[in-house]
Image (cartoon, rainbow, N blue to C red):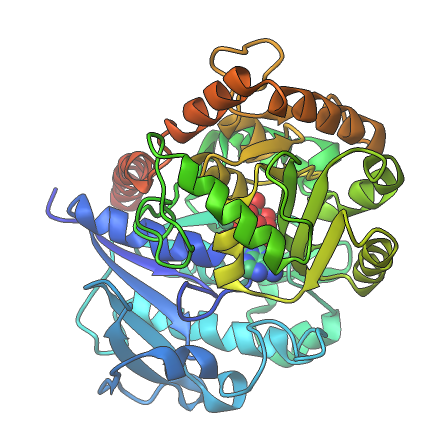
Amino acid sequence: MPDLKILFITSEIFPLIKTGGLADVSAGLPPALSKLGAETRILLPAYLPAVQKMKSLKTLDTPRLAHDATILEGKLPGTKLTIWLVDIPKYFTRIGNPYTTEEGNDWPDNAQRFTAFNQIALEISQNRANLDWPPDIVHCNDWQTGLIPALLAKEVTRPATIFTIHNLAYMGLFSWNTFEELGLPHDLWDMDKMEFHGQFAFIKGGLSAADHITTVSPTYAQEVQTSEFGYGLEGLLQARSHQMSGILNGIDHTLWNPATDKLIDHNYSKTKLSSKLKNKTSLQTHFALPPKKAIPLLVTVGRIVEQKGYDLLIKALPELMLMDIQIALLGSGDKYLETQLIAAAQEHPEKLSVRIGYDEVLAHKMEAGADVFLMPSKFEPCGLNQLYSLKYGTIPIVNPVGGLADSIIDIKPNPAKATGIYLTQSSPEALIQAVETTVNLFHNPPQWQKLIKTAMSQDFSWKNSAKQYLTLYKTVLKNRQSTANK
Ligand code: ADP
Ligand code: GLC
């Protein structure tokens, strides 16, 4: 088989634009694929902040495209990979994040914005945009790219399509009226295609029409087929289970490695752990917590939403604040949860410190300086922070769902191989119990050191995951070609 051409389509990518883990995956997987010999190109909307971060961009000579779109070409910063940005100024030249206004409300024209992006993606996938690069595989990610497999399915000849679910909770739901305004083929409004309980669901385009579906961990691939995690899509996913698999995300060691990380104060490694303690002191000072080495410092970084278990944490706080621990928190999201966390921090300034906002540098310093990372997520398709935590020797406390179950080994049954501590169930009581277990371990230095060293020895680099994607691409392409030849 000649070298595979893969078009990786995403709505965010680090360092150009990031709201969560999808950006890290988009930045990590394509370079890893390309190292394995697959020619990978990336397609992203030309959001204003992303364009501003690109060093040089050229406008490609395309035929007249819908929405008067133009395509800008550059290299993903820090790599040799070609990235194409779909420029439609009325949709993407604006200040704010990819999906919401500065105030945190969804852009009112999100359906129009991502439909336009998907329609241009279709033209590029079908090599009709004069780019002379027909991909073999079109790899779509989350609802913002969900229409692409559905539109491609209508073409007589086409590349094979993969749709990755990073988070089933976000479906891209819009009304019938909006669907009518979009002017899309009417047959898509069908419960076997993209209609979902009287609404138009972008994600269903990917789920119903892609040649293969992946989730970002094997456990999540099973979970989404149950009513507890399937959000009403479990029936469709059960029906497609033969064309669905889970591949755990990797992490980018050029960015997340305590030995080389330029964003942390003191670099360290498994054999030079004393410098981790220096990071702890800086972090405590940064969060205005007493700089005491003997007190376990627990941190959490993330979107403050129910998915991540912040409501459990808030309910557990009165008990946790009785323990000799410190908690430092960075995140933003749900205003109600944010307010409760801020109020609790005001009540316990010596033990709890909260920063509301988004701060990439501080996120690195927190992984480096903390003893423990809290991740009591209700569901977690993969989760990257627990993987960063392992690499930084910061012991994760996790609710064993999705990727957390697939990447962390619990202390209880397996102390010799353990890399973290599991909650026994998704409840505030279980969280309190897990913190108690962790604090006891922390005060037993030989056991704690063993735990840290085992955690730091884990390998979750992208290479393994990229190999699995490559094998999958080849299988899916072969199946697609044999179907097309029938
Ligand atoms: P999700 O994609 O569900 O938000 P992940 O664990 O996969 O969760 O990835 C989250 C990524 O976003 C991590 O790299 C994390 O450090 C980063 N992140 C989330 N919130 C913040 C924040 N407030 N400041 C800095 N980084 C953040
Ligand atoms: C989603 C999930 C998270 C996952 C990330 C990248 O945002 O919530 O668990 O790690 O996507 O795949």
Tell me if 16 is positioned left or right of 466 in this view: right
Tell me if 463 is positioned left or right of 450 in this view: left
Measuring 48% from the left and 66% from the top, which residue is drawn there? 11
In the figure, 168 relative to 174: above or below?
A: above
Residue 47: percent from left, percent from top: 46, 79
In the figure, 126 relative to 268: above or below?
A: below
Residue 162: percent from left, percent from top: 40, 48
Q: Quadrant of residue 107?
A: bottom right
Is residue 89 at least partly visible in the picture? yes
Is residue 204 at least partly visible in the picture? no
User: Residue pushed farthest left?
Assistant: 2
Measuring 88% from the left and 54% from the top, which residue is drawn there? 347
In the figure, 107 relative to 246: above or below?
A: below
Relative depth, front residue between 424 and 2: 424
Relative depth, front residue between 406 and 440: 440
Tell me if 253 is positioned left or right of 374 in this view: left
Residue 453: percent from left, percent from top: 42, 25
Q: How many marks?
A: 0
Measuring 64% from the left and 67% from the top, which residue is drawn there? 357
Dividing the image into 4 quarters, which one contains the C terminus?
A: top left
In the figure, 135 relative to 82: above or below?
A: above
Tell me if 161 is positioned left or right of 352 in this view: left
Residue 410: percent from left, percent from top: 58, 19
Relative depth, front residue between 314 and 186: 314
Dividing the image into 4 quarters, which one contains the N terminus?
A: top left
Relative depth, front residue between 376 and 201: 376
